[in-house]
Each structure stands twice: as C-alpha cells, then as structure tokens.
Image (cartoon, coloured by chain):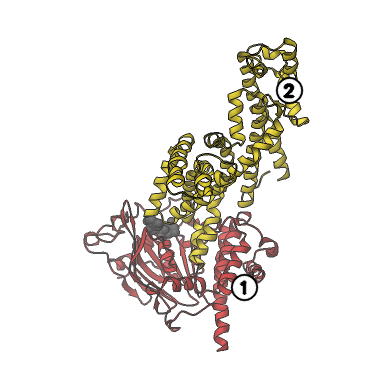
Amino acid sequence: MGRYVVRRLLQFIPTVLGTLFLLHYLTSMAIQFGGNPVRSLFGDRTPPEEQLRQMTEQFGLGDPCLQQKGNPCFGLFWERMQDIFLRFDFGQSLAPRRDVTDVLADALPYTIKLTIIAFIVEAVLGLAAGVLAGLRNGKFSDYVVRIVTVLMISVPIFVSAVLVQKFVGVKFGNWLRQDLDAPEWLGRGLFGAAYKAEFPWLSLILPGIVLGMLTLASTARLTRGSLLENLRADYVRTAKAKGLTTNRVIGVHTLRNSLIPVVTTLGLSIGGYMAGAVVTEGVFRVPGVGFTILKAIATGEPMVLIGLTTVLVLVYLVLNLFVDLLYAVLDPRIRYE
Amino acid sequence: MAPTTEVQARFGPSIPGTDPSAPLLAVEELRVEFRTRAGIAKAINGVSFEVNSGETLAILGESGCGKSVTAQAIMGILDTPPGFITGGQIKYRGVDVLKRSKEERRQIRANKIAMVFQDALSSLNPVFTVGFQLAELFRKHRGMTRSDGKKRAIELLDLVNIPAARQRVNDFPHQFSGGMRQRVMIAMSLALDPELLIADEPTTALDVTVQAQIMNLLADLQRERNMGLILITHDMGVVADVADRINVMYAGRIVEKAPVFDIYAKPSHPYTKALLESIPRVDLKGQQLNVIKGLPPNLTQIPVGCSFSPRCRYAQDVCKADPPPPLYPVQPGISSACHFWKEVRGDE
Ligand SMILES: Nc1ncnc2c1ncn2[C@@H]1O[C@H](COP(=O)(O)OP(=O)(O)OP(=O)(O)O)[C@@H](O)[C@H]1O
Ligand SMILES: [Mg+2]
C-alpha cells in the first residue's frame, strides 16, 4: 500500500507540470500578443521607461522571451516552478499588489464552504433518491427519480445556475422580501440572489445546491443501478436463506456492496466542484477561488491564475488518490501492489 | 419449562402447529411459473416428494429442469416477480409453510431448513470476512455477542476441516480455494443445527477429488446429526454413494422415483435410462458417448403430451396426444411417469 501511494504521488508530477505548463504558455502568449499587463497599472499615463522596466521585473515578467511572439518561455517556466514548489512563492498580483498566497487564503474558505454544502446536498439527496428508486424498482417513485434525474443531467450548470438565481434568488426572493416582509436571514440570506457577507453560510446554500445538483443526478442513478444489480446477486440470496431480516439483507449485505462504486463518484465529484465553482461563484458572486480565477482571466493576472490553478489541480489529484485508497478499504478484493 | 428454553436456545423457537410425527418435508403438487416478457415459463409443473430425518433424497436432472427453483420455493427465496408459486403445498412437519406469515417463514429459514448453494464464491458476500458471515447467524438468531459468535465460527470452520481455523476466520471469501469456500458454505448452513439441508449442486464448481471430499463431508455430517438432506445434482456419478432415494426430474416434473440401487440396476423411465447411458465409462473407452439427442422443451410452450417424448426412443402416438403420464407405481418404492415403463425396464 505504501509503495502504491508513493508511486501515485510520483505520477502527480507530470500531471501537475503539464497542466501548469499549459497555463504558463497561455498566459505568456497573452502577454506576447496583448502587451505588458504592467503597463495597464498606469492607466492612461505613459510611464517612464525606467520605472516600467523596474516594475515589470518585480512582477517577474521581465524575461525577454515575453516579447517574442510564440516563444514557450521554458526558462521562465522553470523559474516559476522552482519558486512555487521549492520556495512556496506564488508571486504577486498586479492590482491590488498582493501576494498570491494571500489572495488564495482569502478565497479558499468560501470555496470550501460551498463545496461542503454541495457535497452534503449531493450525498444525502443523491443517495436517498437512488436507494429509494432502487428499492421501489418499477414503481411510481422510481419513475419520478429517473425522470427528474434525466432532466437534471441534461441541463448544464451555467444554465441551472442562472435559472436558479433568476427564479429563486430574484423572483421568489423579491416576493419574500417585499410582499411577505420576510426576516432578513430568509429573504436576503437563504433566498438571496447573491452572496452576502452578513450571512456567510446561509447565503451559500443556494449556490451550494446548484453546485451539488451538477453531480446529484448521476449519483442517484448510479446508486439505483448498483443497488438493483446487487439485489440480484447470489450473496443476497444467501443472506435471505440465512433467515436474516429484510432490513439486514438490504441494509448490511446489499448496501455495503452497492455503495462501493458510489463512493468513488462522490469523491470524484468533489473534484468536479472545482470546475463547477468557477461558474457558480461567478453567477452568485461568491468571492471564492472560482470567482477569483474568473477575475484573473478578465484582468490578465498571470500569477494569480497559475497559483490558484495549481492549488485546484493538487486538490483534485489528492482527492483522486484518496478515493482510490478508500476503494481498497471498502472492497477487500482490491489490493494495490 | 426449563427444557423448552434449553431447546429454544439451541434450535430457535418452534413453529406453532407442527407435528413431530409428520414427515420432515413434504412437497405436494408444487407449481411455479416465471412471468417474463418472453411469456409465462412453467418451471415446475406439479412436483411431489417427501424427505424424512436421517434420509438423503437426490434430485437429479439436466440443466434448466427446475431443480434450483424447487429449492428456492421450499426456502421461500424465489425472486418474486418474476417467479410465482401457483399451486401445491410445501409442508414442514405437517404445516403448509405457504400459508404462514413472512416472519414465520424467515424463522424456518433461520432455524429449521438451510441451504448450500452451487457457486460458493458468488454466494458468499465478498466484502465481509467469513467469520463475520458465520458469526452473524449466532448474533442475530441466538443473541450471542460478537466474540462468542466468533468463537462459534471458529468451531464451525474446524468442524468442516478447515486448517488453521483461528486465523482463517478473519479471511475474506476470495482468499479461500474453491473447495474451502464450499466448506465455509456448508459450515454456514449447519451453524444453527437445521433439521433439513438442501444442497444445490454443492460440488459442480469443484474438481473431482475435491468433489468426493465435499460429498463425504456432507454425508458424515448428515449421519451424525440425523438431518434430512436433499441433494440436487445433474451428475449421476456424484450421488450414487450418498443418496438413499433418487427423484429424476425433467422439464419441471418428476419422471421417476426409486431407491438408488434400483435406479442404477434397472431404470424405469426412458430419460433415466438415457442419462445412465450417457455417463462416460472406462470399460467402453474409445466408443462414442451416448448423448441424449435433442433439447429439453421451451418452458413457455410445453407440448401437450409427455415433454420427453420428442427425444424418446420409446415414444408412440399416445405419448404426444395424451396428457403427460402420471407416476405409475412400478414396484413398492419405484414409480415412473412413462406409459411404457414395462418396455423400458425390459420386464414382461
Ligand atoms: N429468475 C428467473 N427468471 C426467469 N426464469 C427463471 C428464473 N429462474 C429460473 N428460471 C427458469 O426456470 C427454469 C428452471 O431453472 P433452474 O434454475 O431451477 O434450473 P436447474 O435445474 O437448477 O438448472 P442448473 O442445473 O443449470 O442449475 C429454467 O428454465 C430457467 O430459465
Ligand atoms: Mg440450479
């Protein structure tokens, strides 16, 4: 097991470097074709040549390769990787001028909260709906779950985020706030159209649900299918033949096996939230990692983009590894060599 | 009342209405059908037999004739839907269990009738240790603690001759060999001292030497405990040594009943005869094997007459025209569902 973990950790290296190089190349090209972003700090003024050169150097953008269109800037990439992984120096953002690590530290808690809410929504509702549908196979509730989940799967998250914001956050929220004179926490917190700093958890619930819905449907369907498959398994018949109660036959002997593949998708969906967070946080204006990345793209902040993405990629990879290890714990037939 | 509770502690609660002098298990005119998209498959079409304590009944027949379905119907673990019991009675000590509540049937499964399945690997739960799966029985049905249950599990593994039981009790099913797994299954079925054991092809997945070991183990345990044993198989060779009586099954019907010795000496039904002739024999090595020509009928469209008639070399017009023949008494203890049993036996 230990050797397996080490090998997997070593496999992280090419993945992380590959992803980061791609980002590095894209942001470098943005500079090569779009011009020095430091210049924009001076607004309409034309900065003195010496001052501009000095500042550009300070932001780590002084490498001459950034003036040669199409140059992949391998040297600069190598320097950046050394800064990030050896000195834990993620560079600075341009405006306002701050350490990227600070930007990250500010944004991360929001994304973590959002992820927790989304995960609870997905795990609780997804599992419950899947188990219900599986046990009532072919009955009314099964059809309801199957139809609703198909609808949910076919709506992309940028559509569902905007729709939920408009109809729940704005229309329903306005009705609560104006016509019903609902309390603050309800009207502006739970059913607000955007994140409010006064309600750090409540106002994240709606975006969290939107994010969780991204994978809830597939979790429910997977749970249902897995349960149905296991209900037909020979060992379930054995459990019945042993005279165990139905609760135990299903709750212990069937569920335990059915949930093995579900746990995997649950783990991986947290990785999916990282991508979903960019959209959800953007729509609901949650100042998390995704929102910050969106802003960094819009304003051309290469170091913010690279730093935050590094963290997202690492989180995703570590989760992946964790899920694989969990799999081995749940299914004794799997042993990693 | 002390003795009763002692008995209960060992054998579980007794089933109300049972008569100790009635046969251990009597199946009467059992009918089972599967309602599937392809139509209604009549899997069991009026099967009757009886087993008593200390007796081994073999049910013999080729694949798909309904052996497992019969066993599942007795246990009450038929997949419903698609399977439905449409007629007949299953009497445990004189009580028709089909009329009893789900809870009482569960109690019977837990304490009175146990089953060993064909494929031990898929029949044991892959994610629990064999110790857990054995101890579970004592914990749930005898109210034992986890550690007492585990002690009993080790004793059981010892009983079925698993070496190093104390260590192996913590292993998972996939860590055992095929023969060992089947021993675990047998241990599990015997855990709560059942009165009747149904073994559904317990040795089909195993190689020949292991087959013999498992059969001997089963036979020994049955004798020691004076259990009733229903041995389901499609292999005539396997049951010859251990069974007392044989019921031969074809397309959901029993076509011949006889003591083991008689059936080998002188079969009374053409199907049994063909089965015997299809056993490979060392003294006839090199000659062509006598396989039974043709296929069993499609259970969704069983022909009007005797369902074996299309493959039968004794068949005449009456076999196809008349309803399937009843079990004709041939001799005391022997009956055959063939109009021409005399010709088959060669008696005049
Ligand atoms: N769940 C089911 N759904 C539909 N048909 C079934 C089902 N289970 C059994 N059958 C049908 O019932 C018939 C008898 O099956 P059964 O499993 O009893 O055969 P068997 O005699 O045990 O054969 P084998 O030696 O292969 O185990 C078969 O034709 C089978 O197709
Ligand atoms: Mg079978």
For the view shown, which residue lies furthest in the right direction?
A87
Q: Nearer the viewer, residue B308 or A163?
A: A163
Residue positioned 62% across, 73% down in the render: B144
Chain bearing mark 2: A
Left or right: where B321 falls relative to B238: left
The residue singled out by tag 1 in the image is B144
Which quadrant of the structure image shows residue A111?
top right
Which quadrant of the structure image shows residue A275?
top right
Residue positioned 67% across, 37% down in the render: A106
Amino acid type, label 2 = Trp
The residue singled out by tag 2 in the image is A78
Q: Position of residue B214 (x, y in %)?
A: 57, 64
Which quadrant of the structure image shows residue A41?
top right
Q: Quadrant of the C terminus of chain B?
A: bottom left
Q: Residues within 10 Å of mark 1 (few under 14, many from 20)?
A: some
Left or right: where B235 falls relative to B333: right
Up-down: is B143 above or below B202?
below
Residues tagged 1 and 2 counted as in contact (Cβ below 8 A) = no
Chain given the colour red: B
Quadrant of picture, ligand 2: bottom left
Chain given the colour yellow: A
Amino acid type, label 1 = Met
Residue A138 visible (yes or no): no
